[in-house]
Image: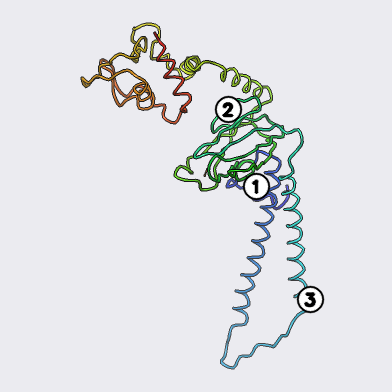
Amino acid sequence: MMWFNIAKAQSFMPTQATEIAKQVDNLYGFLLITSLIACVLVIGGMIYFVWKYRRRTPNDKTAYISHNTFLEFLWSFIPLVIFLAVFVWGWYIYHEMRSMPKNALEINVLGKQWAWEVEYKNGYKTVNEVVVPIDQDVKLILSSNDVIHSFFVPSFRIKQDAVPGRYTALWFRANKLGEFHIFCTEYCGTSHSGMIGKLKVVSREDFDKYLEVGQEERNLPLAKKGEKLFAVKACASCHSVNSPATMVGPSLFQKFGHEEEMNDGTKIKFDENYIRESILEPNKHVVKGFQGGIMPTFQGQINENELNALVEYIKELK
Ligand code: CUA
């Protein structure tokens, strides 16, 4: 649309998923283009004059020019106007970014080494996942458990430090459905680079459903949560849970507390640690009579809470 939208047209910028993102990019594009023009004028002018006024003979003398009022006015006045415009423009966007809208949906986000803990108004908690409805003002109230973290969503062009001992906030209004990255942009220790989350923008109905299901799940007993997960993660397609009959994988029926014989002849006690290891590193030990390499690892795909729920469920398969 506008000529400085060139920065937006380039694929090196992340998706624009908020109105603010567009405004930020427009200003950025303007700065980029004006800097480029200034750079070409200054460097180009310099090269041109170096060439034009080069010394031709040893007695060469250049005309003595003390000043040029018109030129001096131009190169002072034009940059002044540009700088003032950038100041007002930037101030306007900054002001909009920092003025928290009333009636925004509030979500608490706690940064800790090294994850984002998200808590909704109804008490539902998630880790590294923020789900928000589209076209709705959302205010994130940030705090930190330990050191300074920084909450950054590139596609929204928003970034805010999460500081221990105080609250900070940011707001956004997503106008695109989809999944966007959350990064921690303040070095906070060993796994700083792994402090990555997802921000999902969903429809109003999906958001309400998400909270409802989350609330229900929160109230379930641990073993019940495990049972649900067992179904969701499709564990049941390879492991039977209500009879000793073997499928692709060994049955989990009445196994807890007993010893399991491995392919290499060793025996391992079927306890909490064994279940945990079998989920995270399924091919470390292979149960006698089965082939290794079939079950995929769930490392990084389920969190500690989910792991606990699964262990509890498998424990109770009596
Ligand atoms: Cu948290 Cu870097």
Number of callouts? 3
Are discs 3 and 2 less than 8 Å apart at CB? no
Pointer 1 or 3: first along the chain: 1
Residue tagged 2:
125
Q: Residue at x 76, y 61 (%)?
A: 84
- Residue 188, above or below 289: below
Label 1 Cα neighbours within 10 Å, binned few <14 / some 14-19 / many ≥20:
some
**In front of the other: label 1 or label 2?**
2
User: What's the distance in space between the residues labelled 1 and 3, CA to CA?
Assistant: 36 Å
Q: From the viewer's perspective, is 231 left or right of 281? A: right
Pointer 3 or 2: first along the chain: 3
- Residue 275 pos. (x, y %): 37, 21
Q: Amino acid at mark 1?
A: Lys
Residue tagged 3:
70
Label 3 Cα neighbours within 10 Å, binned few <14 / some 14-19 / many ≥20:
few
**What mark, if any, has residue 8 been given in the picture?**
1
- Residue 150 pos. (x, y %): 57, 44
Pointer 1 or 2: first along the chain: 1
- Residue 282 pos. (x, y %): 34, 24
Residue nearest the viewer, comparing 168 with 22? 168
Where residue 109 sits, quadrant-wise, is top right
Q: Residue at x 57, y 40 (%)?
A: 144
Where residue 129 sits, quadrant-wise, is top right
Q: Amino acid at mark 3?
A: Phe
Q: Residue at x 43, y 14 (%)?
A: 236
User: What's the distance in space between the residues labelled 3 and 2, CA to CA?
Assistant: 65 Å
Where residue 241 sits, quadrant-wise, is top left
Residue nearest the viewer, comparing 116 with 74? 116
Label 3 secondary element: helix
User: What's the distance in space between the residues labelled 1 and 2, CA to CA?
Assistant: 36 Å
